[in-house]
Image (cartoon, helix red, strand yellow):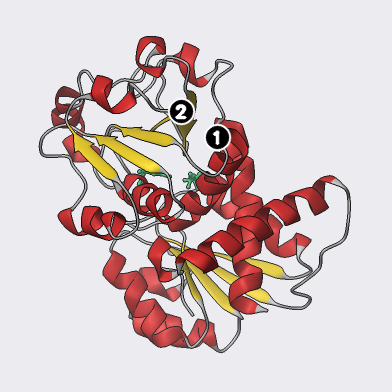
């Protein structure tokens, strides 16, 4: 089984991974060994930079008794033009799973079609389901099993996976994006198959009853040429203390203080961004055990 989008898991499987992530978090905190994947290897392929994804997967494999192999695309033959499919076929002969961060979601699907081992999405232009796993663990810790959560800002990869995942887990999701920067219709349809999603261009309306307000950068990796146009489009979508109200603040990181969020919010007491970042580790360990064991 592959994990390319959050709804590659059924609702029951997703809830199970979040449960297992919470258990692994407790085990780690208690110093209990949990080497569920001894001798197993994970290839970690990166076409884009990463701090959290890279370190949490590599450390996660170590804590599970296995090993993560970092592969920057400039370090391997992919960067010299070896086809994605051939790269995937070769990696599948060595490792027990492949995690890949690539621009084009189609390239990830091609890796999955040829690797012969489970493939995990470490972020594409379309989706960031591993982030969503960590976010769902964070939601459980912060608001419990139900409530209203708001996404404010770009309808990007992180927004897509979070909206579908939160709807699958029973949260009501409000999404506020500027005109022209909304979620794809297909993402909204997939989320609505599972739960209530309200789409608006009004950040105040989206956040009024929300227990959590989540945002991400306005210029994602690969969109640097659109920077000026995007900064104009997202005016009014900054999460500041007024918009946040009493809600908890979430951000997948990295963040740009002064753009999508004010410094007092992300560095303030309602911010749970470091908890989210930590939860990447626990959630991905649970996922790897599910896929590889
Ligand atoms: N949130 C996230 O995926 O961070 P990195 O880009 O540092 O991996
Ligand atoms: N939306 C951001 C997320 C980074 C983790 C990007 O794609 O660059």
Q: Nearer the viewer, residue 44 or 33?
A: 33
- Label 2, secondary structure: give it: loop
Q: Residues within 10 Å of mark 1 (few under 14, many from 20)?
A: some
The percent position of residue 138, horizontal first and vertical second, equals 57, 41
Say which quadrant the C terminus sits in.
bottom right
Q: Dots 2 and 1: beta carbons under 8 Å?
A: yes
Give the residue at x 57% y 29%: 272
Give the residue at x 44% y 50%: 170
Q: Which residue is mark 2?
A: 211
Q: Nearer the viewer, residue 119 or 177?
A: 177
Figure check: 173 above or below 126: above
Figure check: 9 above or below 168: below
- Label 1, secondary structure: give it: helix
Give the residue at x 26% y 19%: 204
Q: Earlier in the sequence, mark 2 or mark 1?
A: 1
The percent position of residue 225, horizontal first and vertical second, equals 19, 39
Figure check: 37 above or below 155: below
Q: Nearer the viewer, residue 291 or 146?
A: 146
Which mark, residue 143? 1
């Amino acid at each position: 089984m592959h994990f390319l989008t959050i709804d590659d898991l059924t609702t029951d499987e997703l809830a199970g991974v979040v449960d297992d992530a919470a258990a692994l978090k407790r085990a780690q905190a208690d110093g209990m060994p949990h080497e569920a994947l001894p001798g197993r290897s994970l290839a970690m392929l990166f076409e884009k930079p990463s701090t959290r994804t890279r370190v949490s997967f590599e450390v996660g494999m170590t804590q599970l008794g296995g090993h993560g192999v970092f592969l920057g695309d400039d370090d391997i033959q992919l960067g010299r033009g070896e086809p994605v499919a051939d790269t995937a076929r070769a990696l599948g002969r060595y490792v027990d799973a492949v995690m890949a961060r690539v621009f084009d979601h189609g390239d990830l699907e091609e890796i999955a079609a040829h690797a012969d081992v489970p493939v995990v999405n470490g972020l594409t232009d379309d989706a960031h389901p591993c982030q969503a796993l960590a976010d769902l663990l964070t939601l459980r810790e912060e608001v419990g099993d139900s409530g209203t959560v708001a996404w404010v800002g770009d309808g990007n990869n992180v927004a897509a996976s979070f909206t579908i995942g939160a709807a699958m887990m029973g949260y009501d999701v409000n999404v506020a994006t500027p005109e022209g920067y909304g979620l794809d219709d297909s993402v909204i349809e997939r989320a609505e198959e599972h739960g209530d999603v309200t789409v608006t261009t009004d950040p105040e309306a989206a956040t009024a009853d929300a227990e959590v307000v989540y945002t991400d950068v306005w210029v994602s990796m690969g969109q640097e040429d659109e920077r000026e146009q995007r900064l104009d489009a997202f005016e009014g979508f900054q999460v500041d203390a007024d918009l946040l109200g009493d809600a908890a603040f979430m951000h997948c990181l990295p963040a740009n203080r002064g753009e999508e969020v004010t410094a007092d919010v992300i560095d303030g007491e309602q911010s749970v961004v470091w908890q989210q970042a930590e939860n990447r580790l626990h959630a991905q360990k649970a996922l790897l055990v599910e896929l590889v064991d």
